[in-house]
């Protein structure tokens, strides 16, 4: 079995794979792993209901400085099978045009690789990951990761408005927010939800034109389900896309696939 960990700035997503199938998912607050102490404890507590440590290999993808190596060391010390941190220079089955593959967020490449692997031949992909930050990346029809954009996530945008003004209130994301807000609170809710959806749709439209080929657009991340209901161009939604991409890279290395030329 393979345990994948997608360590983000807010949460760590966990996925347990058996024979290539995702059989269990969980979520742990990143702060509970980044604090002093054994970061393996919350992971093993979740894993205990599904498998024993000695039955799993561990693949960690992290965008939190220093957390990846700590998780790998701690889980390896607790008896897990082979454990390693996956980074952008691993073989994901894509050609990478990023200036330095090691410096692109592994979550971005993993999500793009998983989407492209599920894509019909001849199609490019646009993948939006909506979490603490929003990233939108593209893979062309030939399997080249073209890079993309990074923007503030929905909650981060709301927090910035609250912190940078004297009168705007703190609000939470509202999946029922109407397009025409009739109060300050409703306007903020509309700006987050519909503004975020418009950002994604607009970027998808521009990237599709630049790719000049049929495109499938995917949404993933913690706010994927929320945005999928109001976007117009993202037909596929899979909040586990990064976990699937990490598993893909692990399986390619285990099977001895040769890295794609960069």
Image: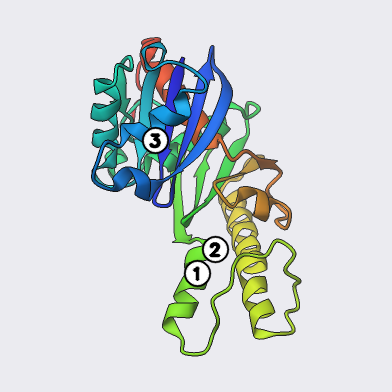
* 27 left or right of 55 in image: right
Q: Which residue bears the numbered disc 2?
A: 154
Q: Say few, some or many: other residues with alpha carbon within 10 Å of mark 3 (under 14 / 14 to 19 / 20 or more).
A: some
- Of the pair 251 and 54, the residue shown nearer to us: 54
**CB of mark 2 within 8 Å of CB of mark 1?**
yes
Q: Which of marks 3 and 2 is in front?
A: 3
Q: What is the quadrant of residue 168 in the picture?
A: bottom right
Q: Which residue bears the numbered disc 3?
A: 42
* 154 left or right of 166 in image: right
Q: Which residue bears the numbered disc 1?
A: 157
* Upstream in sequence: badge 3 or badge 1: 3
Helix, strand or loop under label 1: helix
Helix, strand or loop under label 3: helix
Question: Residue 132 location in percent, x, y?
Answer: 46, 56
Q: How far apart are marks 3 and 1 (CA)?
A: 30 Å
Residue at the spot 35% in from the left edge and 21% down from the top edge: 259
């Amino acid at each position: 079995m393979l345990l994948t960990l997608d360590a983000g700035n807010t949460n760590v997503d966990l996925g347990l794979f058996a024979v290539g199938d995702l059989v269990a998912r969980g979520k742990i607050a990143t702060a509970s792993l980044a604090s002093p102490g054994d970061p393996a404890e919350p992971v093993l507590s979740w894993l205990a209901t599904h498998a024993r440590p000695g039955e799993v290999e561990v693949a960690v993808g992290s965008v939190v400085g220093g957390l990846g190596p700590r998780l790998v060391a701690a889980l390896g010390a607790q008896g897990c099978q082979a454990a390693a941190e996956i980074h952008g220079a691993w073989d994901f089955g894509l050609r990478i045009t990023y200036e330095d593959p090691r410096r692109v967020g592994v979550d971005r490449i993993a999500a793009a690789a998983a989407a492209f692997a599920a894509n019909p031949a001849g199609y490019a992909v646009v993948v939006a990951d909506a979490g603490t930050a929003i990233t939108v990346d593209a893979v062309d029809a030939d399997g080249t990761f073209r890079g993309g954009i990074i923007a503030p996530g929905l909650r981060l945008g709301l927090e910035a408005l609250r912190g940078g003004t004297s009168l705007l209130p703190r609000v939470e994301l509202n999946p029922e927010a109407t397009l025409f807000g009739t109060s300050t609170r409703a306007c903020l809710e509309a700006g987050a939800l519909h503004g975020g959806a418009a950002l994604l749709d607009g970027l998808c439209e521009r990237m599709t034109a630049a790719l000049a080929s049929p495109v499938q657009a995917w949404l993933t991340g913690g706010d994927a389900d929320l945005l999928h209901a109001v976007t117009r161009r993202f037909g596929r939604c899979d909040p586990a896309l990064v976990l699937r991409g990490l598993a893909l890279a692990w399986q390619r290395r285990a099977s001895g696939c040769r890295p794609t030329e960069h």
